[in-house]
Image: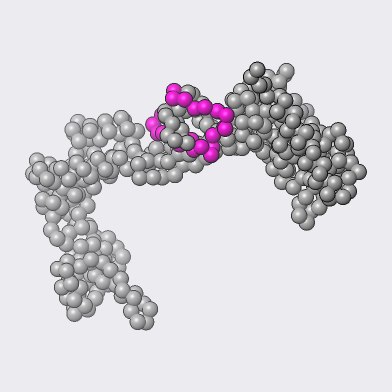
Amino acid sequence: MNNPIASAIKLISDEKGIPQEEVIAALEAALAAAYRKDFGEKNQNIKVEFDIKTGAIHVFDVKTVVEDIEEDELQEVIDEEGASVHSEEVQEDGEEKKHFNPKTEIMISEARKSHFDVEIGQEIKTELRAPDLSEFGRMAAQTAKQVLIQKDREAERNILFSNFKDKEDTIVIGVVQRREEHRALVDLGKVTAILPGSEQIPRERYMPNDRLKVYVVSVNSAARGPEIIVSRAHPHMVRKIFENEIPEVASGAIEVKAVSRDAGQRSKVAVVSHQENIDPIGSCIGQRGSRIQTIISELGGEKIDVIQYDEDPNSFIANALSPAKIESITLHAENKTAYVSVASDQLSLAIGKQGQNVRLASQLTGWNIEVQSKGVEEEDDFDNQKEAASDEAQEEFEQEIPTDE
């Protein structure tokens, strides 16, 4: 590493976290561009190899061996623009007609004059005189610098993309940078993520310098680096917080089977235990509600209903509609609809405020749940009772909201 170029490569690699191989590849591309400007010829395909141990530069003209073509066809191709560019044309019989590119290709008859045992498809490297770095002109050096900077930026973007691609479907901690119209920009360290309006919790306010946990929805490659979309409202965020906060879920002893969420208001989480001596609901709630309160705080006060999962749809639907008590359930498998009967005093509880309870239960179980009061058979009466129950629940909801005197 006594060579100054080798020392510079190590410095760039250490400072930006880019593997030395990628820095060397960028340097070789830059040197090749500089060589072509000052020393290269029209039909040379220049490649440069840099030996980091010795600091030596090796320059090659690299060509691929192709089959011979007819002399008249060769003349026609070269005469088109002075120097042929590889192209393909479709002939009348549907087969592709390949043109010869003297910059990157060499015909096999010509190749065998110096390499007797070559075959079609092989690559031939002819070493050229490697100039001293001081021989490169100012323009060539500027070109090399630009290529090196561009390659360095590309490598840095690729590393960032790879690092954050592994964080998809995880929760990370960020700092709110600023707001732009309906979205917020969240600083995740080396990159800024986007928190769109559709992924925000309605009643939350995101102010600059606020620290918050966000769920990484997607990481995509873009021209200026990775484009990272994060969320506070995604149902998987609840699942991931359960994994982070409850050891039994993290270990696999308890499994989160399904999550339905009305972001900022209420979530229902279906859990099941894979060990007989572990109570899934008790473990998730914790002693005196300590664990579930931590999760509620993480979600800005959002209420969490922990539900016992059951393979039997009847039991699962009954559990999902809690705290309402169910009288009976009739399943129609052909359209996956469950008709649930409850006592009249349980109807508003089963439907919930603005239909929230039955809606979340439907999302959780995957069944379209229709709730009716016990003994109601006529469809009109059923709809009227649902509407009345929803109005009753809405009244209760409005009464809970304090008003200014």
Quick one: which residue is furthest to the right in this view?
Answer: 375
Quarter occupied by residue 171: top right
| Relative side of 311 to 40, left or right | right
Residue 297 placement (x, y as % from top left): 61, 23
Of 289 and 138, nearer the camera is: 289
Residue 102 placement (x, y as % from top left): 20, 66
Quick one: which residue is furthest to the front in this view?
Answer: 405
Q: Is residue 271 visible?
A: no
Q: Residue at x 79, y 35 (%)?
A: 348
Q: Residue at x 57, y 29 (%)?
A: 203
Residue numbers of the magenta segment:
187-209
Residue 101 drawn above or below residue 150 = below
Q: Is residue 26 visible?
A: yes
Of 298 and 16, nearer the camera is: 298
Residue 31 placement (x, y as % from top left): 19, 46
| Relative side of 169 to 192, left or right | right
Residue 338 placement (x, y as % from top left): 80, 47
